[in-house]
Amino acid sequence: MILLFILPVIDLEEAEAKEKVEPFHLTILYTNDVHSHLENVPYLHSAIIEERKKDGEALLLDAGDVFSGTLFFNEYLGQADAEFMNEIGYDAMTLGNHEFDKGSEVLANFIRKLSFPVVSSNVDIRLDPTLAPLMKSRVPEQSEGGKIYPSIIQTVKGVKVGIIGLTTEDTAFLSAPVKEIVFRNAEKKAVEEIAKLQARGVNHIILLSHLGVRQDKVLAQKVKGIDIIVGGHSHTRLENPLVYNLKSVPTLIVQANEYGKSLGKLTAVFNERGVLTEWDGELLDVLAKDQKGNDVYPPDQWAVKRLEQLGKPIEKLKSLDVGATNISLNGDRRDVRTKETNLGNLITDAMLEKANQYSPTEIAFQNGGGIRSSIGAGNITMGEVLEVLPFGNSLVTLNLTGEEILLALEHSVADLDGEAGQFLQVSGMTFHFDPSRPVGDRITGAEIQGAPLDRSKMYRVAVNAFLAGGGDGYTVLKQAKENGRISELYLNLYEVLSEYLSMHSPVSPQVEGRIVKGKE
């Protein structure tokens, strides 16, 4: 009897010991910067469904910028996006800068509709009366949908996994948040939130980061305790994870490009101390075709039918012809943020022509980050114009000195490596820059209407309201606005461009040396 009593105890102890050393296998599926490209969602959903067949407890996460970019957002203001995300069952998302494009009420309505939580560690909304009621200050054992938490704990296969969210501090000037919202230091908040999770016994930590891959690399090397960074904001296509701290406690960085064209998949193995020991990452091309031309991921039929229903109200607008182009118009994300493009020239020419109908205007500026799509040769529809200029920006003019224009041009070329949206497309002027020179001293020459820029002269400049308000870091423009040197024209940019196209089509804009890289 004694032997029969003892043996089960020994077996139990051995089983418990074995359980403690059993490695933890975690699968993460992820998206970022979808920007309301719902046309890709049926394929994305199919890929997610297929991957969940392999691991039913895979986490599905989004690193922000669900908002802005297509007619679906213009029509539904995030409600359609929330419906699709709920249907496929996301576990968490963080806030991107574009989530603040339409103000707090639109964002709050989106969050309220979500069946899963939002994680946001460094966006302080306590003084915003619209968003503050959605914020929960403590890390819950079980999070609720439609709420914002600094971090959450998810239990996967019996193991606690912490999820933290960070948003770029530049949102204050990249988007249109109300002044009551404060974007705290991301690194500091990450450290604080990791400590809170670790105090709760959580030693598997995922950071949902809408900071961009450059900042993610900094965090991976400086902040201890992060296992995996699921990134966004820079639209980076990382086919394989970036690995830091390989010889100590590894940290991985992943990101899935943009627009829901790819589904990121990371499989990670942790030892009993919560340290990564093995991993495998890939991007699944959800729009891929096989050798016979068939979809690798046949579109999910529920999503297809719902998309058709949602698309009916905007089909008429999308199909309305507003003009034509003899050549392709280049709105490639990298190009419009680093060099002159023919589409940038077309947009700024339209801005300049329209502004001159109100008062004499010498030049026009358009930030590359506000140009979101290319247009192929042939007829141009209103839908295509709205996809190029989706942010509802209006046209204004500013009176600027030549010195202020020079400062704006210096800011334009200050972050070429980062492909920052602040890069200016221009009309009515030319400028030369040398990227090998120090930031703030890169402009080597500028002419306005064929004459050398005069630093003391006052010029009238057509810009969009976003830049005039200091967007993309243009404090020099904001100061001019605050000094009363602004004229509101109350015209939306997409209206300005569509009217220009209707008057001048077919268009054939060229790259003509308005922006020259290298010494003058």
Image (cartoon, rainbow, N blue to C red):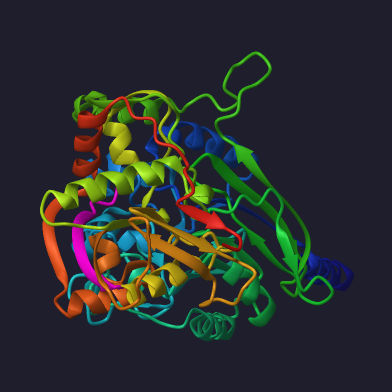
Q: Is residue 391 magenta?
A: yes
Q: Residue furthest right?
A: 3
Q: Position of residue 256 (x, y in %)?
A: 57, 50
Q: Is residue 96 visible?
A: no
Q: Position of residue 59 (x, y in %)?
A: 55, 54
Q: Position of residue 496 (x, y in %)?
A: 20, 43
* Direction from residue 266 to residue 317 in the image, left or right: left
* Direction from residue 81 to residue 57 in the image, left or right: right
The N terminus is located in which quarter?
A: bottom right
Q: Which residues are magenta?
A: 390-401
Between 165 and 156, which is closer to the camera in this rendering? 165
Q: Residue furthest top?
A: 292
Is 180 located above or below residue 55 in the figure? below
Q: Position of residue 313 (x, y in %)?
A: 19, 30
Quadrant in the rendering for residue 118: bottom left
Q: Which secondary structure class fits the magenta region best?
A: strand
Between 387 and 455, which is closer to the camera in this rendering? 455
Is 319 located above or below residue 451 in the figure? above
The C terminus is located in which quarter?
A: bottom right
Is 435 located above or below residue 282 in the figure? below
Total marks drawn? 0
> Image point 33% across, 50% down: which residue?
68
Is 513 located above or below residue 307 in the figure? below
Q: Is residue 441 magenta?
A: no
Between 323 and 246, which is closer to the camera in this rendering? 323
